[in-house]
Amino acid sequence: MNNQRPPTKPASLLGPLRTALLVLILAAAYAYGFRVTKVNLYDLVTGLPNMHHIVLSLLQPDLFVRATEMQKSDTPFLVRAESGALPPPPATPPAKPGPSVEIYPSVAKPGDVIEVKGRDFKPDTPGVIYLIWVGETRLGKITTDAQGSFAAKVVLPGDVTQGDYWIEARVFRELNWYVPSETLILSLRLMLETIFLALIGTTFSVIFSIPLSFLGARNLMMGAPFGRATYYLSRTFFNLLRSIEVLIIVVIMAVVVGIGPFAGVLALAVHGIGALGKLYSEAIESIDPGPIEAITATGASRLQVIAYAVVPQIVPQFIAFTLYRWDINVRMATVIGLVGGGGIGFILIQYINLLEWNQAGTAIWLIAIVVMAMDYASAVIREKIV
């Protein structure tokens, strides 16, 4: 009996060398990546204090304001040119009950000082004087006395052209209750526009994706050469649409149809065709082939096989994928507004550009609440359907 052990083979160096080579490649990739992206953790740490006021403003969104009561009164005013004869003063309107405003003189030229007097306003109330024509120009602040009167001297802007104007005084008194701010009302309206923007965009993408998804299903199209060519063309079409970022699509659509929600709808629809077409096609490919074989054996046509063997199996998944896509589109719709696609993103980028962080906080919190609510609702519906 030979109890001799077989000679041991020397350990191969291929494994350690391959591992070492892989580590070197990864190290070189990360070193070059940090250099290209200019990652600087020191700048991050030292720059964090600059976000202090931004974070505080975002945590204090502009939601409600004190209700105010406004009183106003106006009177006609004539601006004349630098030279020339003095035209007759405007006719004084008949006296009427309530606040009234008088101007001395009633005719002046750009750069002149005029005196504005008012009476019968709310007592001890601040206000503003405006020069009104096509638009309005703020001339100065006022505060009424205990009798509700005021007298203020203001200077006409030097760039005012000759013509008929109105001088208007407005006083504001804060009340003891709060009302929704203009920012909140505008954000709610644009958030509603965002939700329906996503809904219409999803609807258009579903309409086009459903018929195309059958052409992109391998188990339905891989028979004849024409079917295989149709399958590959459909899948290539889906991948092409999905590969183009929705922000790029909305910029293109804004050039075609103009800036606004319609451009956002088209961008979501185009991108959604690629995404939903792929999901629908994969849902069709994952169905049970048994019913297809059984109905095909009865001599049914291709359309009958799809109607009675394929459609009943894919309806729940199609509904689930559609709800999921609508959820995604709501989040996308808040972003495409940044580049002219309408919705709440359009006003959000303006708040950020103007450094109005409290107003931006209102829009951001509203987006977060709606997205979370949509995500929860769609998840519950998908769970009950699938």
Image (spheres, helix red, strand yellow):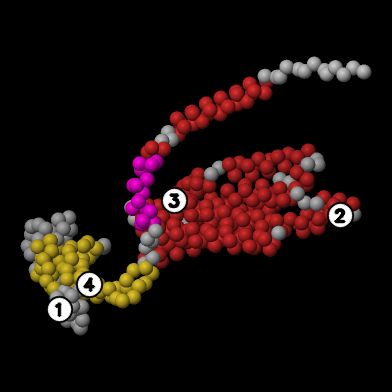
Residue 146's tag is: 1
On screen, residue 204 above or below 173:
above
Find residue 138 and report its horizontal and vertical position in percent. Answer: 21, 62
Circles 1 and 4: CB atoms closer than 8 Å: no
Circles 4 and 2: CB atoms closer than 8 Å: no
Q: Amino acid at mark 1?
A: Ala
Q: Nearer the viewer, mark 3 or mark 1?
A: 1
Residue 270 visible here: yes
On screen, residue 341 above or below 92:
above
Q: Between residue 47 and residue 170, name the one nearer to us.
A: 47
Indicate which disc, 3 or 4, sits on the residue closer to the N terminus. 4
Indicate which disc, 1 or 4, sits on the residue closer to the N terminus. 1
Q: Residue at x 31, y 76 (%)?
A: 176
Q: Nearer the viewer, mark 2 or mark 1?
A: 1
Indicate which disc, 3 or 1, sits on the residue closer to the N terminus. 1
Find residue 352 and report its horizontal and vertical position in percent. Answer: 37, 52
How far apart are the two marked residues, 3 and 4, measured between alpha carbons? Answer: 37 Å
Q: Between residue 61 and residue 223, name the one nearer to us.
A: 61
Q: Nearer the viewer, mark 4 or mark 2?
A: 4
Magenta extent: 44-58
Residue 171's tag is: 4
Residue 338's tag is: 3
Mark 4 nearby-residue class (10 Å; few <14, some 14–19, many ≥20): many
